[in-house]
Image (spheres, helix red, strand yellow):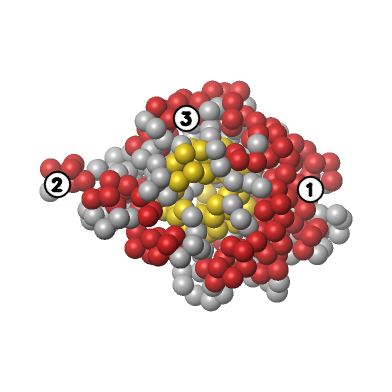
Amino acid sequence: MSKTSLTPYRLGNTELKNRIVMAPMTRSRAINNIPNSLIAEYYTQRATAGLIITEGTSPSPNGLGYARIPGIFSAEQIAAWKEVTTAVRSTGGKIFVQLMHSGRVGHTLNLPAGARLMAPSAVTLPGEIWTDQAGMKPNATPHAMSMEQVLETKREYVQAAINAIEAGFDGIELHGANGYLLEQFLSPHTNQRMDAYGGGVENRARFVLEVTKEISEAIGKDKTAIRLSPFGTANDIQNYPGVDVMYGYLAEELNTLGIAYLHITDQSAGQKPDVLDLVETSIRGKFKNTIILSGGYTLSSAEEVINMGIADLISFGRPFISNPDLIARFNKNLPLNIKFDSSTLYSSDAKGYTDYPVFEEELVNA
């Protein structure tokens, strides 16, 4: 039986081998916030995906809220990422970098000298975060961004996108989900500003849309994309009245910009409110380019939503961690490796990162 998800797909001007996307996943292997040969090996192992979207990569020293996440704002980082993209593309892979500014999510111990934890408003994220220097520490209260800092952060995003193209990426995905800086502007819980970037839907969406527009003008709309999480509650982003209005408005405005894709992640685990229903009834009709859906899909459920026309591509996260040969397993109807070591998700070495076996190795080991 043919599988639509394993057929080629044209994403803007980029030809994908299949419709399966490797979702962005933070793995914390970038020592000193610089990509390395281990990261290059990890992505190259998984380059049979139609598209790889990298882990969240900061456009600014101020956005490095987590320990050992990469950046793409220095010459050294650009050169290091170039080694990663060269390795992936040498095997025929396609790769976008995800630009993720952590905003209020983080601790000052994770930031380089001179950087500052900042967010739309000084609203502290409850809970703790890991620091390599002192273990678990309470999330720090962010500095409320001044207007000049808002404008400077936009410039950093644009420069990071330009850097990404220089580093050999096929495009960039803005991380507008999971409670990081862009979503912090969208939510009235984390955005309590009284200026042009706070208040009603249009004002709260302004920063996201301006960043997207300016990047698309700098590197091309076919190389520009964004990830969103309607109804998501990650990092204490709380649901609010009018969530559907916000994301309908974003879909219309992003469609006008003509960007390559919307990547919609569903964190609801099948509970109401229904993200898939929102995409089907509202977002799909307003955004005419590619839609990627993410959130606990199997090959069977991926086939269903693609064939229904709700999504064009499906992204897989954790299955790619323990199955570097995920596409081959899908092609040959092979069982997935379900052994998953959660203790190594955010460690610093190869264990639980590049040492998961392909299917033939599993048989030998068994």
Q: Nearer the viewer, residue 207 or 263?
A: 263
Mark 2 or 3: the one toward you: 3
With 147 as the anchor, is 74 left or right in this view? left
Q: Earlier in the sequence, mark 3 or mark 1?
A: 3
The residue under label 2 is: 363
User: Whole-percent x and y of residue 179?
Assistant: 62, 57
Residue 314 lies in what quarter of the image? Answer: bottom left
Q: Residue at x 62, y 68 (%)?
A: 282
Please tell me the numbered disc located at residue 85: 3
Q: Mark 3 and 1 residues: CB-CB less than 8 Å, in contact?
A: no
Q: Label 2 to label 1, Cα distance in Å?
A: 55 Å
Depicted 16 relative to depicted 232: above or below: above
Residue 29 lies left or right of residue 2; in this view the side is right
Q: Earlier in the sequence, mark 2 or mark 1?
A: 1
Viewer-proximal residue among 128 and 318: 318
Type of amino acid under label 2: Leu
